[in-house]
Image: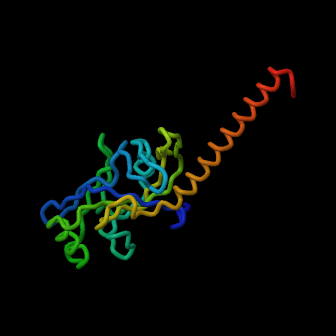
Amino acid sequence: MTYATSVDLERRAVVELRAEGDRRLRGYAIVFNRNSLDLGGFIERIRPEAVDRTLSEALDVRALVGHDSDKILGRTKSGTLRLSKDARGLRIEIDPDPDITYARDIMRAVARGDVTGMSFAFRTLEDDWRLEGDTPMREVLDMRISEVSIVSFPAYPDTDVSVAQRALRAFQAKQQRSTSIAWLRKVHRTRLAAGGI
């Protein structure tokens, strides 16, 4: 089994979390087909099929506090984190251990409404880039999710988009090459029509 390095991981966030009593956290780590904010020169959507691999391969996903691997709230392998897909997105259900201080603290913060954000870390396996007007649009079609996290600031601009930025630069270079090739073909056709080479 290969593991993604932190260089390969991207993080995104949504505001979709609530506490149920003092025992369980429920929410959406991912909401499908919703445009992100500007992620540094592009907009992103997560397609519903993007989470299928994580679910079908039963990947061992962790639930963390603030992306801190020392603060584990649940895990799919142990059954204390459950993931399911519905029409809206990827639902999560976490059973934090009330005997762990940080788990108790985050449950209180969520119950009070002080913390309402979810985030997820993933490695993109397939995406599709295109222009919508002048804005590059990225649709994530397939990915491996490694963690979901309870976060205080679920804003896209505060997340790590460096991996996606590399993909954006590759898309932009491809667009420039396509434009250059189309321009050269047009010049060539014009010259041929004029009888010159």
Q: Is residue 51 left or right of residue 88?
A: right
Q: Residue furthest bottom?
A: 101
Give the residue drawn at x 20%, y 62%.
24
| Tally of numbered tags | 0
For residue 175, side relative to residue 31 (left or right) = right
Q: Is residue 187 above or below residue 148?
A: above
Work out whether residue 69 or residue 66 is closer to the camera in this orientation and state it: 66
Residue shown at the point (27%, 56%) measured from the top left: 15
Residue extending farthest to the front is 194
> In which image quadrant can residue 121 be found?
bottom left
Residue 20 found in image quarter = bottom left
Residue 31 placement, left or right of 196: left
Q: Quadrant of the N terminus?
A: bottom right
Q: Is residue 139 above or below residue 97?
A: above
Q: Position of residue 3 (x, y in %)?
A: 53, 63
Identify the image quadrant of residue 26: bottom left
Measured from the top left, where is residue 187 in percent x and y?
Answer: 76, 31
Residue 144 horizontal/vertical position (percent): 47, 54
The quadrant of the picture occupied by the C terminus is top right
